[in-house]
Amino acid sequence: MTREHDPLERVLASIRDAQPPPDLGHRIKADVGRVRQRPATPARWFVGLAAAVAGVAIVAAGLMVVRPSPGPATLPSASTAATPPATPEHLASRAPTGLGPDTIAVATREIGMPTKLPVSVGQTILIVGGPIEHDGVLSYLIQHYGDTDAGYRPDGDVAWIRASIIERSVEIHTPTCPTDVNLPTVSSMQPFERMICFGGRDLTFRTVTASELAVGVKTSRRWISSDGHPDFFTALPVYGLTQKLALPDGGWFDVTGHFDDAAAIECGDPGAVAFCRERFMITAVKTVPAPVAVIPGTWRSTALPPIDGRTDFGMVWTGTQAVIWGGYESSPKKSVFIAGAPRGGAAYDPATDRWRTIPDAPIPGRGSPVMAWTGTEVVVFGGRIGEQTRLDGAAWNPATRIWRTIARSPLTGDEPIGAWLGDRLYVVTSAAAAAYDPATDRWTALAVAPIRSGWRSAAAAAGRLFVIAFGDGATPPVEWALLDPATATWSHGIAPVDPTEAGVSFAGAGDLIVSTDHGATFDPVTETWGTIRACPGVSAGTVWTGGYLVGVTAAWRFDECLQLPPAPKREPPFNDTNGREFPMAVWTGRQYFTWSGGTGGDIVWVPKDGAVFTPENDIGPCCG
Amino acid sequence: VTSGTASTREDPLDLVARARKGDRESFNELVDLHVADLYRLALIVAGPELAEDVTQDAFLAAWQELPRLRHPERFVPWLRRILVNRARDLHRAERRRILPADLAAAAAVVDRRPGRADPAPEVDALTDLHQAMAGLSVDQRAVIAIHYLADQSLPEVAAILGIPEGTAKSRLNAALTVLRSRLGDPR
């Protein structure tokens, strides 16, 4: 099927050409003509009124600098029209509850935010201002950024909320301010906690690098991190960059700066001032040597295979070759939306850089098959064709180049997932579980996993099968289950993971199950959860070498997160070096081989290129 | 996706800067520049029945809130986010599953495309998409629309929607699974 016959591509083309009704623009302009803009900087309230009395004063908690400001005082409006001016007493005093400007509080009841996500119980907020009359009602201006449970809002929300609601919905919270000031510690704090804890004093973050990160529309796109892979929880957006205070890509620096910059007062309304005060303003940059945090080694591109790129395929290492089977093939003429599921596959030998096709299997092609290498055969089982679950399987013998169908499984249900453990392939569905023994071509039925169905993934570690279930990807709880093959019994519990993170991968790493995205571990022996240093670059194309978990851009071992050198650039239009979304990979014992995977943007097919990384030193079980 | 009909050669950043200060003419030029793109985004996120309303609401909200936009260069992503939020609010407010496609609404969209002798295949295609999309949440549709229609990378999608990149990935993955099964033709 060519791209022009791709139904989704055809529809997208229709929409790309679609024109709005001719009068839509006129209607919008008419609306605009009738409505006034909301003021951006009526916020001299925070400045002018109190300052008129106090000159330069410190409000309440001693952290908000208030300066004289000329001109008429008006109240800030987070929502609507002007409101009566506040009195200086309102600004300078606190409520009997002790709440006032620059108080951090924790919600004991949910607090609705106008048109935004609510503040949920347990979440911390900043009292930016108040209690003060707003729209004729005594109110507080509050700010929040969400939290792990409710989800983070990188841009933060700020809104006026009635004082009566706030005072019965929060308790004052005193943040724990770290004495050991380093980037990971500071980054993991709420933005207002940083401002409260460190005020305007100089902080220096040593041996950091800077890179682009687009998180939130208000946030600086330049972030400092310890590993060059910034995210909202481990890195810090920086401000005040100039030609002299520059943080170019690839460099390493000691960066000095401060929160609560005095110029923040010029940012406008009190909400904007609060956001500005929480910014880390750079005042000095010193170039330093790069840390030894890169795994030395070299990448090379592989020869191109005789098959198209694929998504949702499986890949296993047989000891001499990587066998690829299943998935949906796509190419410039066949988008991922209409991609077919071929019965055949391909095998790659990194020693000779040569590919061989694998003939059609005796079962239909499908996405997301469970695959395993038994020592003599590649077993493929289960998967999906569209919304249809497949519970059949086959085995490919690379020596004889012959397929055979495997015995019919006793499984029912949907979403088959599994892993190879010992000498059997263990498979779990929404309604059943079973183990396949390739030596006897027999299945053994097992008890069903005692956890919710829906979005699940499986991994093996410490000789056990770990299954994590995200349900619908929105509703808690996330559940885990663990199968001990020796006793054929399940244990299970609640996982401390947000259900919306259903795309996050869990991988077996020796004796641990590890999520390098979350920095979470699960010990299958003690059945306990723990935390580790996050290492997000590992999550794409993850393999366990016996010493490290390796991904396309990084490698993890306990609290080490090492970078890989940049992978080879892809052919246009896939010109992003590391933009490999959803690739698969194998560890050959000495090399890391990754193949296919998309790059995002509007490119609706995936390339068929592969790359091999050869570490300079052994990172496998002997030496990792 | 390219911008709609541009009625000015003026730097859009200048237009945003002037509109922030209350210049309606400049904002009207921004409407001319972006109404088509925003409407197309709304077709996916909100569906043909609601696309006009959501587009209109989004521009009005943008006008009202524009003085608070701290980074004028982020005007377009900001506008998209407003639109997605409006679609979500409307969805919640009316407690309706957005789309199953209204054939008449789809036909109206196609009818406005210039030079189409036989609109039927396009109507069918649009209807198919919206029927497939009916299985997706507003947030999943937003990820699909911004990623594939508005050409934005996943980090940018995450930024526009104010969600972690991992969430954007999981939403995209889930949405693709549904679309692939409903629109695809796997062997």
Image (spheres, rainbow, N blue to C red):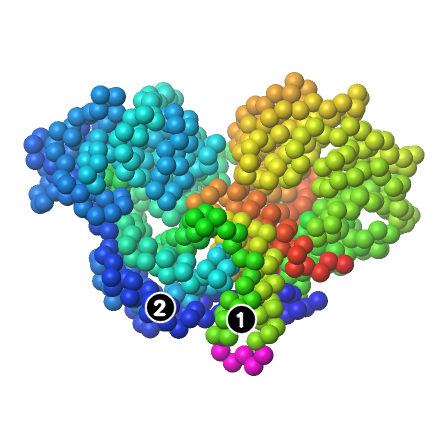
To which chain does the residue with label 2 belong? A
A181 lies left or right of A391: left
Vertical order, A445 against A387 (above or below):
above
Q: Which residues are magenta?
A: B113-118
Task: Please rate how many residues cluster around mark 2, counting C-alpha atoms within 10 Å: few if below 14, some from 14 to 19, many from 20.
Answer: many
Q: Which residue is mark 2?
A: A25
Q: Secondary structure at mark 1?
A: helix
Instruction: Give the CA separation, mark 1 to mark 2.
Output: 20 Å
Q: Is residue A170 above or below residue A356?
A: above
Look at the image and say whether residue B117 sits in the magenta stretch.
yes
Q: Which residue is mark 1?
A: B107
- Circle 1: residue type: Ala
Q: Secondary structure at mark 2?
A: helix
Which amino acid is tagged 2?
A: Gly
Relative height, residue A371 to residue A129 (above, below): below
- Which residue occupies the foreground of this view, B163 or A471? A471
> Which quarter of the picture shows residue B162?
top left
Image label count: 2
The chain letter under disc 1 is B
